[in-house]
Image: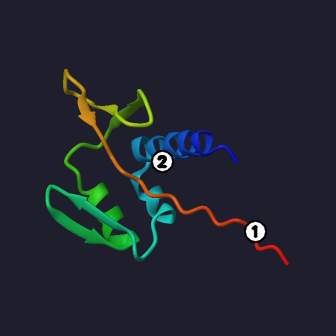
Amino acid sequence: MDPNALAKAFMEHYYNTFDTSRSGLANLYQQSSMLTLKGQKIQGASNIVAKLTSFPFQQCHHSISSVNCGNLQITGKQHPLKLSQVLSLSVKEPCES
């Protein structure tokens, strides 16, 4: 499995879900997942999704410019925000017998 292709596919899925239905992100987080936002630490899938859905904007559009950085365009705002986010993915390989 090509790690770059996997990362790109995950990012496209994650940000498309974020842009269209943030509550749909719950199954991408675990109870041990941690979101750190402006110094605030939020742990657990339900707490993270609660935070993401509490943002004051209802609509936005992420455009992925690279695997390292992208832009976040909030509806009604003229200029996009620069976005950098770290997502750690765990891929479980099938067990060999």
Quarter that holds the C terminus: bottom right
Q: Is residue 13 above or below residue 49?
A: above
Horizontal relation, residue 44 to residue 94: left or right: left
Q: Few, some or many C-alpha atoms within 10 Å of disc 1 (few <14, some 14-19, many ≥20)?
A: few
Q: What x and y, as percent, mark residue 4?
A: 57, 40
Query: What residue do we see at 47% from left, 57% from top?
Result: 24
Q: What x and y, as percent, mark residue 57?
A: 23, 43
Q: Type of residue at label 1?
A: Pro
Query: What residue do we see at 30% from left, 56% from top?
Result: 52
Residue at the front extreme? 97
Q: Few, some or many C-alpha atoms within 10 Å of disc 2 (few <14, some 14-19, many ≥20)?
A: some
Q: Is residue 31 above or below residue 38?
A: below
Circle number at residue 14: 2
Residue at the right extreme? 97
Query: What residue do we see at 61% from left, 39% from top?
Result: 5
Q: What x and y, as percent, mark residue 10?
A: 54, 47
Q: What x and y, as percent, mark residue 39?
A: 14, 61
Residue at the top extreme? 78
Asked whether the residues under the numbered discs 2 and 1 touch, taking CB atoms below 8 Å apart as contact, a structural biologist would say: no
Asked which quadrant contains residue 90, the reply is bottom right
Q: Name the N-terminal-most of marks 2 and 1.
A: 2
Query: What residue do we see at 21% from left, 68% from top?
Result: 41
Horizontal relation, residue 55 to residue 45: left or right: left
Element type at marker 1?
A: loop
Residue that carries the numbered disc 1 in the rendered image: 94
Q: Is residue 42 above or below residue 11?
A: below
Label 2 to label 1: alpha-carbon separation: 24 Å
Q: Type of residue at label 2?
A: Tyr
